[in-house]
Amino acid sequence: MRFVSYFLNDRLIVAPETLVENLDFTPVPFGELPQIEPQLLNSSFKYDEKLQQVLYGKMLLFDELQLPLKTIQEHFENGFVMYNQGVIKTKYGWQCKRCGNEKYHLFASFSCFRCKSENCVYCRNCIMMVRVSVCSPLLSWIGPDVKHKSDHQLMWRGELSAGQQIASDCFVEQVGNSGELLIWAVCGAGKTEVLFHGIEKALKMGLRVCIATPRTDVVLELAPRIKEAFPNTLIVSYYGGSKERETPAQLVISTTHQLYRFKQAFNLMIVDEVDAFPYSYDKTLQHAVSGSVRNDALRLYLSATPSGKMKKQVTQNKLPCVKIPIRFHGFPLPEPKMVWSGEWKKRLERGKLPPAFLKWIKSQVVSERRAMIFVPSVSIIEKVTELIRGHVEVIVDFVHAEDPLRKDKVARFRQGDIQLLVTTTILERGVTVPFLDVVIFGADHEVFSESALVQMAGRAGRSKDDHNGQVLFFHYGKSLSMLNAIKHIRHMNEEAGF
Amino acid sequence: MAGVLQQNRSLYVYNDFLKEVISKIKYRGDAELVKGFYPVMRSKLKGISGDTILVPIPLSNERHYERRFNQADIIARGFNRDVHNLLERNAHEEKQSKKNRLERMKKKDNPFIVIDNNSIRGHSVLLIDDVYTTGSTLRYAAKVLIEAGAISVSSITLGR
Ligand SMILES: [Zn+2]
Ligand SMILES: [Zn+2]
């Protein structure tokens, strides 16, 4: 967009060109305006409550608001809305103020109808959430805070295990303070319940709370549980395609990606699966988390397999940490067993499965138990599935990240319609199915890190009635990751007193 | 109106892949993706005379403001020749779409107008658009160009 700027009573005013009739002003692309200062708050101005609710704690584009330009401009002139730059020029290139991207190759330009520039630079990193360019202002709310109601009530009446109780108490104590806390809980510890009391305290204090997770599946699974626990609280979930975004919620459940929309919004930020891809790899996602919280916020991290960096911070006493080494049902984590399966790659090329693996498949079918069979790459997934089908009568299927039937297949597996599911690491987290064994085919492959192996092993034995699921690593030579994963699980079991 | 458009060439079949790329360009606004097509486009233009004028199919002003670029214009730039934005959408077009089918069939109003007849007169014109579906858009555009004095009009699209 193009804006004009002029001085009024010694203050610089900017306005979209279409709202100003004076032809003496020369419109310029938004990014070329002089430094904009917020206008003085005019407390007698009757502000639009809807705009306040939508924009509060966020950074949005004009195109994301269903309001006339004129209304928004009035809020700017009266000191309720601020226009911030979307993409700025830096010493070495560009920076996106929404997602923090600074990578040169993730910027491009186009001939722009709105600002008439031949090279309007835009960010490609966060393009999935409405394009932001040099000429598009990011709007923020600088008027009065949204007042949240305070009759929050935790309706959850379940009991915490001893391990959960310790972590929950530790979390509750920290609510209201700023800083960080890591809850290191084994797969199956029941981490959602650990959050309830801390969230309740925060809500009652009037704090804004966010639970962020890298995956949409988890948002969808978590939202109904949290809503059930806090029936009096306005809770909204954010993920690609979610529809509730205009409701002002005190409690937000969001994918880490969607956090780009928030600015300085939350007093309590809970980051689930803090070690999970892509969060740990993507600097701009970390930027999204930092950008969305207040400076004095408390950040709570949840993980079953914290990164090496985090573990180091814990041992150096730089990151407070509380561990839940024991599963909710009180039984130890199943320890993986290693099974030599020779040159599985070569055998596969010849259209054969390793004998040890074949033997297991046959016994698994007889046991009538379900199994997840993890393979190292999507390229062999169909072949492995076909070969297994050649040996057994039960239903075998495969699933991977790009599979359009992914949801459906996982549901059928859960219901027991599929007995053996061949999968890539996409199912390493989140999916909980009772009466399940876990097998890693080619566990020595380099894609399987220690944490991936721990997570996959953590799928087994999660229910009280079936706490002793089997975990097998089929390999052609033990990898360091395999050994570390087994050590990791043993250590957690020892710490739990087994 | 038959016969006003001499020939249409399309670079690709409009399959799911192309559909996805074009929707990323148009609706997400990732204009940069067009550049991926540039090398193929350039090779396709070799047989076309240097005097031919490249004219992209325009968007309505509302649509253009909303999208901020015209994908046909960006595609046209890939041919590495001058691009002439000599067509414009008729301002009454939006109202036209509300008329019923019969009225539309009868309508004499072409959705396009030529901005500058002098630049067209005596030239061959190559129209550029993203997708060829029924071809009626291109034929309407060809018709006004012929009326404005173009010798011949052909077209090129990314997908069909
Ligand atoms: Zn960005
Ligand atoms: Zn622009």
Image (cartoon, coloured by chain):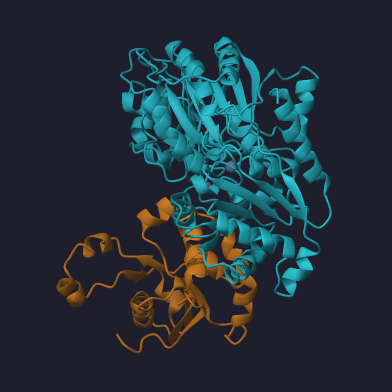
Among the chains pictured, the one given cyan colouring is: A
In the image, residue A360 lies at what x, y percent?
Answer: 66, 58
Q: Is residue B111 above or below residue B154?
A: above
Q: Which image quadrant is residue B98 in?
A: bottom left
Q: Is residue B150 above or below residue A4?
A: below
Q: Can residue A38 be seen by looking at this rendering? A: no
Between residues A128 and A88, which one lies in front from this camera angle?
A128
In the image, residue A326 lies at what x, y percent?
Answer: 63, 26
Q: Which image quadrant is residue A141 in?
A: top left
Q: Can residue B67 be seen by looking at this rendering? A: yes
In the image, residue A151 lies at what x, y percent?
Answer: 34, 13
In the image, residue A233 lies at what x, y percent?
Answer: 36, 22
Q: Going 81% across and 62% down the picture, which residue do you hit?
A: A342
Q: Going 41% across and 65% down the picture, which residue do you hit?
A: B58
Q: Which image quadrant is residue A76 in?
A: top left
Image quarter hosting the C terminus of chain A: top right
Q: Is residue A406 above or below residue A335?
A: below
Q: Going 58% across and 86% down the picture, which residue do you hit?
A: B49
Q: Going 79% across and 21% down the picture, which residue do you hit?
A: A315
Q: Is residue B123 above or below residue A445?
A: below
Between residues B93 and A371, which one lies in front from this camera angle?
A371
Among the chains pictured, the one given orange colouring is: B
